[in-house]
Every structure is written in C-alpha cells, then in structure tokens.
Image (cartoon, rainbow, N blue to C red):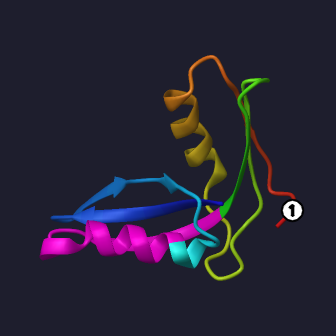
Amino acid sequence: MCLLPQVHRSNQKLDWSFSGLLCNTADIYDKVSEELEKGGLLDCECVGGGRIKHDPQAKQIHVYGYSIGFGRANHVTATEKLKAQYPGYEVTWDNEGY
C-alpha cells in the first residue's frame, strides 16, 4: 500500500510520502497524520493512495491502483520520489488495478 499525503506548514505545501505494513490507506494516513500534526505546526491532507510492488532482486518498483476511500494518488510524483530513493531501480507506474 502506498500513500501520498500533502503536508502543510506555514502556508507552504510540502510533499511527504510513507509506505508501510499497515493494512490500508486510512490506517497509514491515521498514523502518519497523528505523528506529523503533533505540536500543531503541520496540517495533513490525504490526496490519494495506491499500491507499490517491489521486487528487490530484479531492482524494480511498480506503482499502481488507487485507494477506495481517498482516490488515486499522483503516481508520477510518487514515482519521482521513489526514483530518487532507489537509484539503479526501474521505477514504473500505471493507473490499472485496485
């Protein structure tokens, strides 16, 4: 599962992403937003979700699908962030699947 929330601070929009072992987008968002909003300096907004298939042996990551509750994340943005974090990987995306 993949989640791409937007985090706002002092009228600035910051992109922040999270992936984890939680069951669904809502669970991930609840955990992330609770942590980031501590102290009242940040405000989170979920702008969509999706899935990530990671094959470390083939050095491939594929972003796809959507969240039923939050809709589809911008997979282009997620893919760009993953490429920066995983140099040497083939990182692709599409809008197919759930």
Residue 25, x across and y down, in percent: 59, 72
> Which quadrant of the figure has residue 20?
bottom right
- Relative to 19, say whether 48 is above or below: below
Q: Residue at x 51, y 39 (%)?
A: 81
Q: Residue at x 56, y 37 (%)?
A: 82
Say what amino acid the circle numbered 1 marks.
Gly
Q: Residue at x 58, y 47 (%)?
A: 78
- Quarter of the image containing the C terminus? bottom right
Q: Residue at x 55, y 78 (%)?
A: 26
Residue 84, x across and y down, in percent: 50, 28
> Which quadrant of the figure has residue 72?
bottom right
Asked if the stretch drawn in magenta spans residue 52, the answer is no
Give the residue at the far right of this rendering.
97
- Relative to 56, say whether 22 is above or below: below
Residue 87, x across and y down, in percent: 57, 20
Relative placement, left or right, of 16 versus 53 is: left
Q: Secondary structure at mark 1?
A: loop
Residue at numbered disc 1: 97
Asked if the stretch drawn in magenta spans residue 43, the answer is yes
Residues in magenta? 28-49
- Quarter of the image containing the N terminus? bottom right
> Which quadrant of the figure has residue 76?
top right
- Relative to 94, say whether 87 is above or below: above
Relative placement, left or right, of 53 versus 81 is: right
Q: How many marks?
A: 1
Give the residue at the far bottom of this rendering.
69
Q: Residues within 10 Å of mark 1 (few under 14, many from 20)?
A: few
- Relative to 52, say whether 89 is above or below: above
Relative placement, left or right, of 41 versus 24 is: left
